[in-house]
Image (cartoon, rainbow, N blue to C red):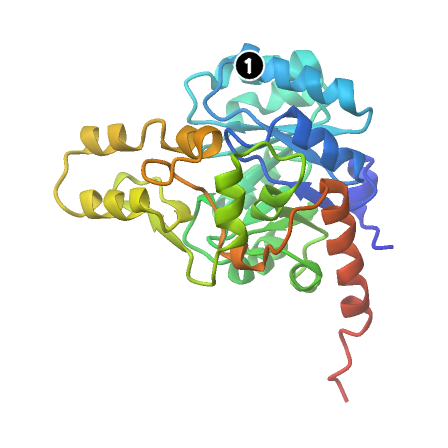
Amino acid sequence: MIHTPLCDLLGIEYPVFQGGMAWIADGKLAAAVSEGGGLGIIAAGNAPAETVREQIQIAKSLTSRPFGVNIMLMSPFADAVAQLVAEEKVAVVTTGAGNPTKYMALWKEAGIKVIPVVASVAMAKLMTRLGASALIAEGGESGGHVGELTTMVLVPQVCDVTTLPVIAAGGIADGRGVAAAFLLGACGVQMGTRFLSAQECSIHPAYKERILKANDLCTMVTGKRLGHPVRSLRTNFARNYAKAEYGGMPDEELEALATGALRKAVEEGDLENGCFLSGQIAAMVKKIQPAAEIVREVMEGAEPILKGATQWVR
């Protein structure tokens, strides 16, 4: 079995994180991943603190194993959720869409392992100095909010500037991706899109069907004009948004156009008005299966590749 320092740090069996996907990663999914030996993560998104508390309680009722909460720092409820996770003493907090500096002391005092998502070397250096427990280096192949660098370029550069454990994210769907991440210097991986096909994932059946039918060119990035690029499936909504983004629509109207679009995808499966977040690996997702099986499958797939990684060296 592949066992890395990340497993010892967090008390998990496999060095696999489930990504914190807004409106998608709830307490049920997080608990299923944690029960399977990985680290399940509840996405706070733009939800108020009490909603996040409900999902934490659901996860606690379904697993005694460690799980985390992802806090989107752009959320208007970020301050309240930051306090909530300290009160609930969740095992891990991951962060995205911002700088968690002002919350680090609070979380560390509560005994929480703080693992920020970083999309640049500069942010990796800053989070290392501030006492993060590990770093998630997420490339632009991922779904949702994305940065400019690819996973293959970002991960080794982050590994070069920190002594912390690095978790690779973006473009990872199977054992080949896990093995590649480890050879780049990571000691764990985070997968989001792969878990959209988990039986415990509560997204609308139409969403899962679109993932299962995806091809290699199924995603596109919108939102660059507003400074918050997002990767999603190529739906009518995404195409219309792209036209509006570069067609002169005022910023306020552009922001309003996207409001509620992810909820419409997740809860209603609305193919016309919904934003179906997805990474570039969607075409590699072939079946619906339990979350625990996904965790085990990707790790078992990585082992023989890593053992034979030097086969071409003479």
State the residue in front, 233 or 223. 233
Residue drawn 76% across and 47% down? 293
Residue drawn 62% across and 13% down? 54
Residue 275, image x, y percentages: 38, 39
Residue flagged by tag 1: what amino acid is it? Thr
Residue 36, image x, y percentages: 79, 39
State the residue in front, 71 or 107. 71
309 over 204 or under it: above or below: below
240 horizontally vs 294: left or right: left
Q: Is residue 2 visible?
A: yes
247 horizontally vs 174: left or right: left
Q: Residue furthest bottom?
A: 314
61 over 187 or under it: above or below: above
Q: Which residue is mark 1?
A: 51
Residue drawn 84% across and 51% down? 3
Residue 164, image x, y percentages: 69, 45
Q: Residues within 10 Å of mark 1 (few under 14, many from 20)?
A: few
Residue drawn 36% across and 32% down? 261
State the residue in front, 127 or 43. 43
Number of numbered discs on residues: 1
Q: Is residue 162 visible?
A: no
Residue 68, image x, y percentages: 67, 29
State the residue in front, 229 or 281. 281
76 horizontally vs 139: left or right: left
In terms of image quadrants, where is residue 302?
bottom right
308 over 241 or under it: above or below: below
Query: Mark 1 falls on what kind of element?
Result: helix
In terms of image quadrants, where is residue 134?
top right
In terms of image quadrants, where is residue 133?
top right
Q: Quadrant of the N terminus?
A: bottom right
